[in-house]
Image (cartoon, rainbow, N blue to C red):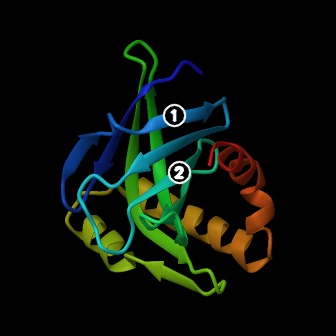
């Protein structure tokens, strides 16, 4: 895969942002790994790495503080639209998110936003059910203890860079 331009589309709030400062570290037909800094300064984290699992519909990120200490895993349920002639990838946030804390506790977030987007017609029925199904797939990976195995290649690649 030639290194494309990435765009992040959010439904709530409605925005589409070019991720022009993200650095693509690795890309193949199944995954793409990026390094990034926060778009706006934040107190809780400073930078991170993301792995876009192109077939699974996940964006799994590792968030770090400015001193490079690990904060948590942040998992987004997403869809991808590839425009080969323009060499772009549009990553649409399908709203459901999962945080995995260093102590392995898990928080599911933004299901209220997922329902709000469906109610307001911002999300088709197909995308709504697809998001819920992908969330279930991700939670199954976590609950069955396969998350670290699932993210192994991602971790190997970023470990070589840090």
Q: Where residue 37 is drawn, which disc sits there? A: none
Q: In which image quadrant can residue 18 be found?
A: top left
Query: For the residues marked 1 and 2, what is the alpha-carbon distance in whole angstroms?
Result: 9 Å
Residue drawn at (32%, 34%) of the image: 20
User: Under tag 2, what secondary structure?
Assistant: strand
Q: Give the crowd class for mark 1: few <14, some 14-19, many >=20 residues within 10 Å.
A: some
- Say which residue label 1 marks: 24
Which of 113/101 is in front?
101
Residue 42 percent location from the top left of the image: 28, 67
Residue extending furthest toward the top: 85
Residue 38 percent location from the top left of the image: 33, 55
Residue 103 percent location from the top left of the image: 65, 87
Residue drawn at (80%, 75%) of the image: 145
Q: In which image quadrant can residue 144 be found?
A: bottom right
Q: In which image quadrant can residue 141 be found?
A: bottom right
Q: Give the crowd class for mark 2: few <14, some 14-19, many >=20 residues within 10 Å.
A: many
Residue 112 percent location from the top left of the image: 33, 79
User: Under tag 1, what secondary structure?
Assistant: strand
Judge left or right: residue 158 versus residue 125: right
Q: Where residue 50 is drawn, which disc sits there? A: 2
Judge left or right: residue 148 versus residue 108: right
**Mark 1 touching mark 2, by CB under 8 A?**
no
Q: Is residue 54 above or below residue 101?
A: above
Judge left or right: residue 85 versus residue 161: left
Which of 124/90 is in front?
90
Q: Is residue 43 above or below residue 156?
A: below
- Quarter of the picture holding the N terminus: top right
Residue drawn at (40%, 58%) of the image: 94
Judge left or right: residue 143 versus residue 126: right
- Count of residue discs: 2
Of mark 1 and mark 2, the one earlier in the sequence is 1
Residue drawn at (23%, 62%) of the image: 12
């Amino acid at each position: 895969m030639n290194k494309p331009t990435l765009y992040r589309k959010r439904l709530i709030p409605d925005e589409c942002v070019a991720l022009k400062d993200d650095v693509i570290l690795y890309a193949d037909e199944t995954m793409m790994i990026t390094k990034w800094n926060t778009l706006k300064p934040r107190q809780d984290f400073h930078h991170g790495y993301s792995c876009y699992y192109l077939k699974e519909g996940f964006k799994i990120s590792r968030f770090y503080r400015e001193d490079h200490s690990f904060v948590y895993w942040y998992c987004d349920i997403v869809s991808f639209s590839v425009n080969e002639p323009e060499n772009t990838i549009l990553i649409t946030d399908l709203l459901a998110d999962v945080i995995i804390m260093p102590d392995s506790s898990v928080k599911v977030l933004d299901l209220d936003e997922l329902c709000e987007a469906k109610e307001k017609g911002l999300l088709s029925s197909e995308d709504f059910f697809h998001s819920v199904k992908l969330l279930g797939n991700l939670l199954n990976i976590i609950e069955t203890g396969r998350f670290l195995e699932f993210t192994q290649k991602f971790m190997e690649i970023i470990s070589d860079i840090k």
